Image (spheres, grey):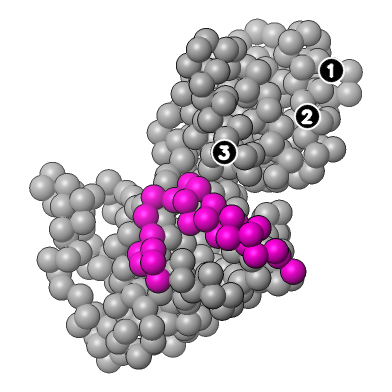
Amino acid sequence: MIKLSSRKDKISKLLTRGVEEIIDFDHLQSRLSSGEKLRIKMGIDPTSPNFHLGHLIPLLKLRDFQELGHQIVLIIGDFTGLIGDTSDKESERPMLDDSSVQKNSETYIEQAGKIIDIKKTEVHRNSEWLAPLDYLEIGRQADLFSLNEFISRENIDRRMKNGRRVSLRELLYPLMQAYDSVQVKADVELGGTDQRFNLLAGRDMQKFYQQDPQDILTGPLLEGLDGRKMSASYGNTINLIDEPRDMFGKVMSLRDDLIIKYFTLLTRVELNRINEYEIKLKQGANPRDFKLELAFEIVSVCYSDAEAISAKDYFIKTFSQKEIPADMPSLKPKNYNIIEVLLESNMVSSRAEAKRIIKQGGVKINECTVKDFDSTIPNGSVLRKGKINFLKIE
């Protein structure tokens, strides 16, 4: 049982830390304070096989709700994933095929379970209720919204002004996400700032089906390793399934100006401590010292304290002391092309990421920087990605 004073503090942090907007704040705060058990919804489309740190923001928020005793409802968008959400896109997202969606979502429950208690989580695939919908019901739902509401969205308006195609299919996506909220009777839905239109559509859709409208909690978008929004399509992600050593090293390569944001959104280090770090950084303290703690905290959240300690020791030994580890993993690749080896060894999650790292000079064979995407790795070589990732090629 959570003590009253502790519960109030937890609710306050839940409603403020890493939060961009809450609709309706007073209503949600009142319901949380009353002790009512709420249904907290988050959906994710299987457009990529991996969760990354951008997903960690709402997953940690789900865990906060879960620790207060609320019911988490995780929706895997196996149907919405086919249609494609272009809320954050500057061009039309192509339709995926069913096999790609199913393959991408194979480990979603396992990955989410690294952060939230899956045994206490209600999990759905939205094809359960979206696939059986008929034209008449979709027509009734579509009548709730005007075309003007859709095209006035910033990115859609920009695409139209630039003469880029906007498909009628894209008009349907907000209806589908909104109908998810009806089906699971959501009290609260989480999403990024780019999801605001879709989240609000859920409120309208629930009213249409005689349900109380859900409250909305939006969180900020996270920059990736190249400063753009973290996205698998950009190849700039730190994935939740990255090995602890690789995850630690990627965090250490983070831009200095993102340290405080990452601490705030991706850890549960006390905010007063983070404020002290921010002051010290402004006063000229070495960012590396704070990145070491940040990397430790993130690996600890995704794995354990023991794994974080091991990853930190490994980083210090291989980077600070410039040692090549004796216990590096080995691989006999199917194809000795540099990009294929990086993919097969899971050092990268996509060809785009492999090419980006090679362009930046971040890949070496026997300590010689790779410059050509068509490079072949000789048998017996040591492949190095970044500062701390080594692989013996057999």
Badge 3 element: helix
**Residues at marks 3 and 2, CA–CA distance in whole angstroms:** 25 Å
Q: Which picture quadrant has residue 172?
A: bottom left
**Of the numbered discs in the image, which one, if any, rests on residue 311?**
2
Q: Earlier in the sequence, mark 1 or mark 3?
A: 3
Horizontal and vertical percent for residue 301?
70, 45
The amino acid type of the residue labelled 3 equals Leu
Q: Earlier in the sequence, mark 3 or mark 2?
A: 3
Residue at 75 percent of width and 21 percent of height: 315
The amino acid type of the residue labelled 1 equals Pro
**Of the numbered discs in the image, which one, if any, rests on residue 271?**
3
- Is residue 65 part of the magenta span, yes or no? no
Q: Quadrant of the N terminus?
A: bottom right
Residue at 40 percent of width and 71 percent of height: 27
Residue 118 visible, this angle: yes
Badge 2 element: helix
**Residues at marks 1 and 2, CA–CA distance in whole angstroms:** 13 Å
Q: Nearer the viewer, mark 3 or mark 2?
A: 3
Residue segment shown in magenta: 1-27
Q: Earlier in the sequence, mark 1 or mark 2?
A: 2
Badge 1 element: loop
Residue 338 visible, this angle: no
- Does 257 sit above or below residue 304? above
Q: Nearer the viewer, mark 1 or mark 2?
A: 2
**Residues at marks 1 and 3, CA–CA distance in whole angstroms:** 37 Å
Closest to the observer, 241 or 217: 217
The residue lying furthest to the right in this view is 326
- Residue on which disc 1 sits: 325
